[in-house]
Amino acid sequence: MKPPAIAIDGPAASGKSTVAKLVAQELGYTFINTGAMYRAIAWYLAQQGVSPAQREEITEMLPNMPLDFGKDGASSAVLCDGKRLRSELTEPVVNDSVSLIAAIPEVRAFLLHKQREYNESEAVVMEGRDIGTVVFPDTPFKYFVTASEEVRAARRAAQGLTDSISERDKNDRERACAPLARATDARVIDTSDMTIEQVVAEIVDDIKDKTQVQV
Ligand code: DC
């Protein structure tokens, strides 16, 4: 039987990364940050001077990019020429271009395959925008984590980041291919007035309830 996949989706700065990481820790599953995968491609293309509008060039480049989507301990990690990408992934050029890169269907198809591969041999908690709708549509464990725009903007500022999350969310919601959307069978959690611990507990309890029912 395929190992379980926990899908956590939501808009930017909704707290889903922090929550997903803690849920993974608590369950002993691998945490996969799919935003980092799109960001790595956006960063690499910016290094090469390729703009998000150059769809054909990007499609041709995809299989030959020196990027590796692997793991570091119990979390996903992206490497370029063998070096782990970290601060590169939140550079302004990446924040500005990533939602345009993520709207390219060929980029999404390329990463979809890699995202599903992570779950072939191990249980994962995967966070992103289309995990419950496209990557793992059959998983019974889907959560849509959200928060008010004010709370999200404040969280972003507290991280020292000033990118326009509302513009990025608009792009992510309005793209034709695998837009940011709540799966109809996802449990919605508005984290505006919740602590991280409360959100994690709600998800872990729900997974445990569902797992008992399935056994
Ligand atoms: O989660 P994040 O903010 O690091 O994601 C960066 C961008 O990548 C975001 O603007 C939308 C895109 N993305 C996506 O389209 N699909 C995903 N599963 C994850 C991220």
Image (cartoon, rainbow, N blue to C red):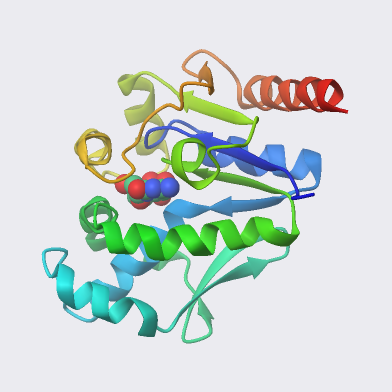
Q: Total marks drawn? A: 0
* Observer-nearest of 164 and 58: 58
- The residue most toward the top is 193
Q: Residue at x 80, y 49 (%)?
A: 1
Q: Residue at x 51, y 36 (%)?
A: 132
Q: Residue at x 19, y 37 (%)?
A: 167
Q: Position of 71 compared to 130: left or right? A: right
For the C terminus, the quadrant is top right
Look at the picture and state if 109 lies above or below 154.
Answer: below
Look at the picture and state if 198 lies above or below 8.
Answer: above
Q: Position of 13 compared to 101: left or right? A: right
- The residue most toward the left is 53
Expressed as whole percent of the image width and height from the top left, the position of residue 169 reads: 27, 36
* Observer-nearest of 138 and 43: 138
Q: Residue at x 45, y 36 (%)?
A: 133
Expressed as whole percent of the image width and height from the top left, the position of residue 80 reads: 45, 80
Q: Is residue 148 visible?
A: yes
Q: Is residue 91 visible?
A: no
* Observer-nearest of 100 and 83: 100
* Observer-nearest of 37 and 209: 209
Look at the picture and state if 163 lies above or below 72.
Answer: above
Expressed as whole percent of the image width and height from the top left, the position of residue 174 reads: 20, 36
Tell me where residue 178 sits by quadrant. Answer: top left
Expressed as whole percent of the image width and height from the top left, the position of residue 127 reads: 53, 43
